[in-house]
Amino acid sequence: MALDIRHLRMICAVAETGSITRAAARIGLTQPALSTHLRSIEKTMGDALFVRSSTGMSPTPFGQRIIDRARIVLSEADALFTDLPIAARNSLRFGCAHLACVATVADRVQNALPERDITLHIESSAAVLADSLARGRFDAALVGTMEGFDVPIERPVTTRVLVPRYPIFVAIAAGHRLAGEHRVRLTDLRDESWIGPPGADDGSLAALRTACRAAGFEPRVRFEAPSGGGQELIAGGHGIRLVEPTWPAPPGTAVRPLDGDPLIARLTVAWRQDRLSREQAADLYRELTCAYLAHVTDNPLFHQWWQEHPEVHPA
C-alpha cells in the first residue's frame, strides 16, 4: 500500500487523541475503518506504531519517529497556500452542513464574495468540517453542532454563532401511529428502528443515544444512510430518523417536533482569518443569515417554534 497525506493525518489523529474512537470522529471515519487503515499502515511500515494501554493508544518508539516526521510533512502541506495574500486567492472552498437552505446558501455565498470562484462541499459531520477548516481544506463553513457535543475549533479559524439553539425534529412514515400528533414523546419511540448517519459518531447519533438513555431506553439503530438519504425507508415504515427542522416533510413522511425539545442544535459560521478579511467575513455572515431565514417557513411546525423564540433570531 502506498502511503499518502490522508494516512499521515490518521496516524497523527490517533497520537493526538490517544484513542481510535476519538481519532475516527475527528477525521470522519468509522472506528472499524480507521482500525483497518491503521493495520495496513503498520504493515506497510513494517512495525507497530501504537500500543494499547490503560490510558489509551500510545506511540511505540518507532511510531513516535514516524509521527514526528508526519507532522513536519502535514505542516508543510497545510501551509502550502497559507502564505498567499487574501486578495490573490480567486477561489473559496465552502463547507456546509446538510440543511434545507443549502441551495440558497450557494447563491448567498456567491453574493457575499462575487470576486471568488466558490466551491461548495456538503458535509454533515461537524468534526469533519472543523478539521477541514483547521487543515486548510475549507476556507469557511456553516457548521451545525448538537448541544453538549461541541467540536474543537483551532486557530486561525474563528466563529460567530448564527442560531444559538434550535430543536431537532423526527421524521416518521405518513401512516405511522404517531403521525397525527402535534408533538411526539421520545419515550413513545422506544420500540422503533432508527436510521443513523454514516461515518463518525460525533454529533446527532451520539446525542440521540444520550437523549434516549435519559428517557430510559437504548435506541435500536438498524440502518445507516446519509443525512439526505433514508427517505424510502422512512416512507415504507422501516425506520425513523432525526432531521433538521426546516426540512419540509418529503412525500410519504411526516416531520414532527419532539416533546420537550430533548435534542438541541446550534448553527455557527466559521472561517479562516487568513482566507477572509474582516469585511468579507461580515458580508458572508449577513448573506448566510438571509439564506437561513428564507427557509424558516418551509416547515410550519418549526415556523411556529421560531416565532415563539425570538431570543434565538440572528441579529
Image (cartoon, rainbow, N blue to C red):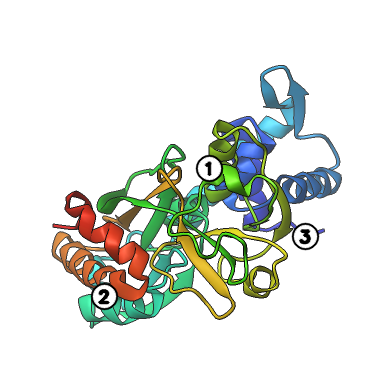
Disc number for residue 294: 2
In the rendered view, does 145 fall on the left or right side of 202? left
Question: Dot 2: what SS?
Answer: loop
Question: Dot 1: what SS?
Answer: helix
Task: Quarter of the image for the N terminus: give it.
Answer: bottom right
Q: Residues within 10 Å of mark 1 (few under 14, many from 20)?
A: many
> Which of the two labelled residues, at mark 2 and mark 1, occupies the earlier sequence position?
1
Residue 223: x and y in percent read 72, 59
Q: State how far apart marks 2 and 1 are (Cα).
A: 27 Å
Q: State how far apart marks 1 and 3 are (Cα).
A: 37 Å
Residue 179: x and y in percent read 54, 64
Q: State how far apart marks 3 and 2 are (Cα).
A: 47 Å
Q: Nearer the viewer, residue 162 or 16?
A: 162
Residue 82: x and y in percent read 36, 59
Q: At 61% across and 32% down in the image, what residue appears?
A: 216
For badge 3, the amino acid type reads Ala
Disc number for residue 2: 3
Q: Residues within 10 Å of mark 2 (few under 14, many from 20)?
A: some
Disc number for residue 207: 1
In the rendered view, does 135 fall on the left or right side of 291? right
